[in-house]
Amino acid sequence: MPASSVVVRDLRFRYPGEHHDALHGLSIEVAEGERVAVLGPNGSGKTTFVMHLNGLLAMQSGEIRIGDLPVVEDNLREVRRVVGAVFQDADDQLFMSTVREDVAFGPANLGISGSELDELVERTLKRVGADGYADRNPHHLSGGEKRRVAIATVLSMDPHVLILDEPTSGLDPAGRRELIDLLSGLAQTQLIVTHDLPLALQLCARSVIVSGGKVVADAPTVELLSDVELLAQHRLELPMGFDPSRL
């Protein structure tokens, strides 16, 4: 059995001023190299959950480990190196004047410089199909191009785990297909938060539903998406006429 890449046990979290927990005993284990779709209605706790995995939210109760590394304050620098997050809006993580500078930013802060840094940037951009973009302004790119570059900024840090929040949001059909091809070719463990249920089926053999701040379903994606009653219970809908068993 593959080693565990992500282990979360009894994670609980309440935002200041709220009377109810956003996470209510959430537990999940993800094997090394596994791609898992995280599904659920708005307000279910999906984003709150994944923001704990690299310490963007400080844990209040429970346990999180990335491999053998506990997610605690003393380890946050290393945790943020090994867990890369790609936000829903690529503009949130593209803030330099050129693509090259954006992709180089993380490794440069780790002390990589000179020709080694240049080669790393070029290699990473090629890996995501964005070679030739290095001197372009990231804010002049298309949505799909921005998403590729945002992923490159994370991959340049050589993470073990990728967190992707609504990765197909705003993409046209061609951009969506290109993103699926890109993600399916990456070896990292991936947790993909999405409302795009066909994407979950195309990329992830396993899916979980988060509702009420905890995992309420965990099954092979085709099995989970074939349970119409379960989907309706948690405000999830497949596109009209889409049959999971035929993909």
Image: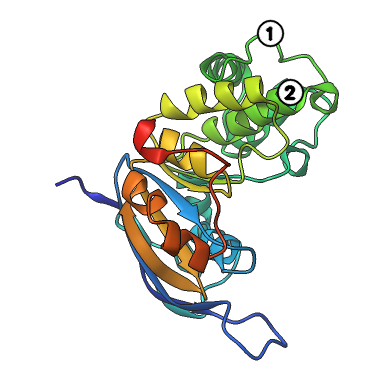
Residue that protrudes farthest toward the top in the picture: 132
- Occupied quadrant, residue 187: top left
Residue 15 visible in the picture = yes
Mark 1 residue crowding within 10 angstroms, few (<14) / some (14–19) / many (20+): few
Residue 225 x/y as whole percent: 41, 50
To which residue does mark 1 refer? 132
Query: Who's the residue at 44% across and 56% down the image?
Result: 228
Q: Secondary structure at mark 2?
A: helix
Residue 212 x/y as whole percent: 52, 76
Q: Is residue 114 left or right of residue 11?
A: right
**165 over 76 or under it: above or below:** above
Mark 2 residue crowding within 10 angstroms, few (<14) / some (14–19) / many (20+): many
Q: Nearer the viewer, residue 196 or 232?
A: 232
Query: Who's the residue at 72% across and 88% down the image?
Result: 17
Q: Amino acid at mark 1?
A: Gly
User: What's the mark number on residue 99?
Assistant: 2
Residue 7 visible in the picture = no
